[in-house]
Amino acid sequence: MFLSQGVEDLEAVTIIDVLGWTNVRDNLSPVNLKTCAFHDSVKGKFGIEFTPTFNLKKEEPDYTQFDAFVLPGGFHNAGFDEAYSEHLHKIAGIIHQNGGVIATMCVGILPISDAGLLKDKKATTYNLSRFHDNVERLKSGKAIYTKQKVEFDNRIISCAGPASSLEVAYLLLEQLTGKENTDKIKKLMIY
């Protein structure tokens, strides 16, 4: 999971929490989440400080070893613009090309669109921005904007905003570990 400065705290924490639950009981299929950023420390828009596993300016993991790439959204005026880097386009492309899932939330889908991974694919994004036309940016990447809360096409998950974070996290977990394991996690979390 890539963490930009100004990441939407809820979106990042939801992924951390749901995937973390896979490690609380021996009968569950565990998921080992690794986080990355361009910094040693990342501050979410609403104040949560994250310490990423990898600082991509100092260390480059082998992306072919990952089954998914997660890109939470964030606030452009707080540093999210760094998520539009060619570096992230490359990461997403490698993981997706090797059969991995991409899970995004809110405006996190826009760098994926810029990377060219959504041509003729369904996707959704946050559409209430005061300063950015997110829908047009999504469409400029040749995506088919569906206006849905959550969309899943060609192993790429997108959602319209932080309120759908839990649904995205469960859908990602199901793609990684199967429906039975995901149902066990939901039961433990009293879904």
Image: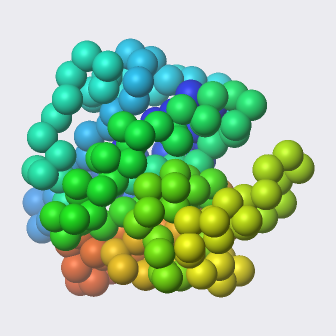
Q: Position of residue 107 (x, y in %)?
A: 63, 54
Q: Nearer the viewer, residue 99 or 73?
A: 99
Query: Residue placed at 37% from the left, 63% from the top?
Result: 102
Q: Is residue 188 above or below residue 121?
A: above
In the image, taking residue 92 as reference, residue 160 lies left or right, namely right
Q: Is residue 145 above or below residue 47?
A: below
Q: If the image is split into quadrants, where does the N terminus sit?
A: top left
Residue 78 occupies which quadrant of the picture?
top right
Q: Is residue 83 above or below residue 56?
A: below
Q: How many marks?
A: 0
Q: Position of residue 91 (x, y in %)?
A: 30, 47
Is residue 91 in view?
yes
Query: Residue placed at 23% from the left, 54% from the top?
Result: 94
In the image, taking residue 45 as reference, residue 84 lies left or right, namely left
- How is this picture coloured? rainbow
Query: Residue placed at 30% from the left, 26% from the top?
Result: 56
Q: Position of residue 39 (x, y in %)?
A: 42, 19
In the image, taking residue 81 as reference, residue 67 lies left or right, namely left
Q: Nearer the viewer, residue 69 or 140?
A: 140
Q: Position of residue 124 (x, y in %)?
A: 62, 72
